[in-house]
Image: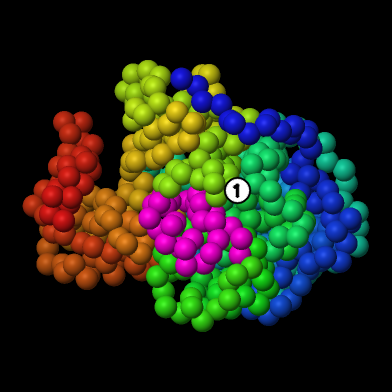
Amino acid sequence: MVVVSPYPAVDIPEVPLTAFVLERAIEFGDKPALIDGPSGRTITYEGLAGRVRALAAGLTARGFGKGDCFAIYLPNLPEYAIAFHGVASVGGIVTTVNPLYTADELAFQLEDSKARFLLTLPQFLDNAKDAAGKAGVEEVFVLGEAEGATSFMELLSAGLDAPAVDFDVHDDLAVLPYSSGTTGFPKGVMLTHHNLVGNIEQFLGAHAVDSSDIFIGLLPFFHIYGMTVLMNGGLRSGATIVTIPRFDLEQFLELSQKYSTTRAYLVPPVILALAKHPVVDNYDLSSIKLIMSGAAPLSGELAAAASERLGCHVMQGYGLTETSPVTHVVPDDPAKDKPGSIGPPIPNTECLVVEPTSGEELSPGELGEVWIRGPQVMKGYLNNDAATSTTIDSEGWLHSGDIGRVDSDGYFFLVDRLKELIKYKGMQVAPAELEALLLSHPQISDAAVIGVVDEEAGEVPKAFVVLAGELGEDDVKTYVAERVAPHKRVRVVEVVESIPKSASGKILRRVLKDKEATTR
């Protein structure tokens, strides 16, 4: 049974992303668009639009234009939006990178995306230069000044007008975030201008955000959830976004109180802290009227606990990088919430629940894989037709890899995942990537990685290793930690005699998960 959205359909304008997001920037004028939370440094809407135009001219003067790729390796700062939209406005493609990535992880994404330029901070410059050298990046820019890199301000001082760009919004890419999809190493997710404009309109068609709202900008802009819902959705609506470069609970609370934030887009580990940490009682969070959770499942019990403590509606939505990302969201109205539900499909979105093996359509209440179809579905994976064809079928249905059910009211509930990604605090960790790294150690002969339940993080990576020499569990953890971003670190290690595999040699992670569940 095809489930359609209960929300009214929205009209999606045939315009490029930046023109859409900043359409009302002059109207909003000197209203703060972005505030750097720790310093109070502010960029108004008019100032943002002017800097975006200046950057577009500066990029054009350097020969950067339509189809070229620009990597942003930054934490949340007001300049993120300037860089993002300056690139997008000249037809460039933005690839957003986790600022905690190691040089090797960064180099992989830079090389795969064929990024010409890279923007970072001086404190990340060693990794940036190392990776840029390996990937053939032409120029590295920094916010501020640093030896061996060009100041970002040089791109804003060209004093020229950027030429008009002829966009095909259905085909031209705006953003290239990286996702592991259902399995394997990270893949570039090709999102067009129409995908992103559409998803912003769809989300705002389900949630009543307006220019009176003040967002707390904790959710990372490099992540599709923070990029679309928080940064671009907020700017389209005329909201003010208070950015936080890294998570610190007390700073988050202090800034939420100081700026009287009205909406917080978060992930379950932060909501857990809001529900349980004693320091929360020291702050006045009464201005917050809604908290939305995404990127990982939020239990009805945790949502209720946070809601009761803070006196606001705590609900959740759902999406994937491959869907720009939002596909489901609980209504703003608390009376229409259902504990544990991700809500109904958003406007212009269809969903199916199917039997995973046969693809047979299932009825309400039956568990199966959730399929999604709508204008937010990606163009495909970069240079990977095989992965694209296994994710999007010939009828345009994206196979999410998530197991769930739909009730008689059209609300969806997720219960498990077909895919084997580990979700550490909402961030994706690919077991295959960690397994490959473990196997590069001369004293590890075989390895498998699964996610195990953790109250704070949701899941943490656990490694099962077969040793070929003397090696302690802490040695294994250290080996991985020195080579990956913090969210990918192996937190638990178990030495085993063998790794269970199928006849074709595929690791039977389900066997390990069942064993782990029995042990616990």
Q: Looking at this rendering, what residue extends furthest in the left direction?
A: 497
Name the residue: 60% across, 70% down.
Answer: 286
Residue, x 88% and y 62% (percent of image)?
Answer: 29
User: Is residue 50 placed above or below 414 in the rendered structure?
Assistant: below
Left or right of residue 262: residue 335: left
Does 442 sit above or below residue 446?
Answer: below
Pointer 1 local density, CA inside 10 Å: few below 14, some 14–19, many at least 20? some
Q: Please tell me in which quadrant of the rendered image residue 132 appears.
A: bottom right
In the rendering, at what x and y percent does residue 37 appear? 65, 74
In this picture the colour scheme is rainbow
Q: Is residue 366 shown above or below 220?
A: above
Disc 1 marks which residue? 332
Magenta stretch containing residue 505, yes or no? Answer: no
Q: Furthest residue to the right?
A: 160
Q: Position of residue 303 (x, y in %)?
A: 44, 56
**Does any portion of residue 60 appear in the rendered image?**
no
Whether residue 77 sits left or right of residue 25 in the image: it is: left
- Placement of the C terminus among the 4 image quadrants: bottom left
Q: Is residue 81 above or below residue 448?
A: below
Disc 1 marks a residue whose amino acid type is: Asp
Residue 291: in magenta span: yes
The answer to whether one can see residue 457 in this image is: yes
Q: Looking at the picture, how far across and down is residue 408, in whole percent? A: 45, 28
Write the start and end of the magenta stretch as one range: 288-317
- Where does the image place residue 124, in percent across and percent down from the top left? 55, 71
